[in-house]
Amino acid sequence: MAVISMFYGIIISMYFFDNQKHKIPHIHVRYQDEEAVFSIIDAELIAGSIKTNKKRLVQAWIEIHKDELMADWELAVNGQEIFKIDPLK
């Protein structure tokens, strides 16, 4: 697992070689004791749960950084080092 960004107590990460379970490009999100998985393609929640206000922040961040996230996804599924992405400001 590699943390790619953190903002407002939200931790965004990707796992290496993580294209088997969900089959689509996605990120893992942690906030306090909640965990969720979001699609990079459409920013939809695909697993887990997270507070509504934090969900909206993550979805906005995904939309802003979609190209960077897709580039990181390609690296991660091939086991290569991924890059940090600017937090939501």
Image (cartoon, rainbow, N blue to C red):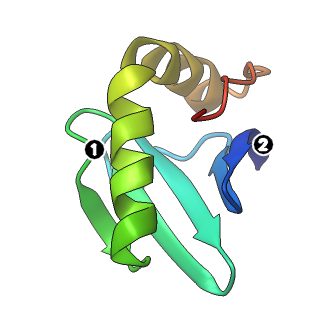
Q: Residue at x 44, y 49 (%)?
A: 58
Q: Which residue is mark 1?
A: 43
Towards the viewer: 72 or 65? 65
Where's residue 87, x and y in %?
65, 33
Residue 21 image-quadrant placement: bottom left
Q: Residue furthest front?
A: 89
* Residue type pointed to by label 1: Ala
Q: Residues within 10 Å of mark 2 (few under 14, many from 20)?
A: some
Where's residue 31, x and y in %?
63, 72
Mark count = 2
Q: Which residue is mark 2?
A: 2
Element type where label 2 sits in the image: strand
Element type where label 1 sits in the image: loop
Q: Is residue 64 left or right of residue 9?
A: left
Q: Residue 73 — which label?
A: none
Residue 10 in view here: yes
What is the spatial separation of the Cα atoms under label 1 and label 2, in whole angstroms? 19 Å
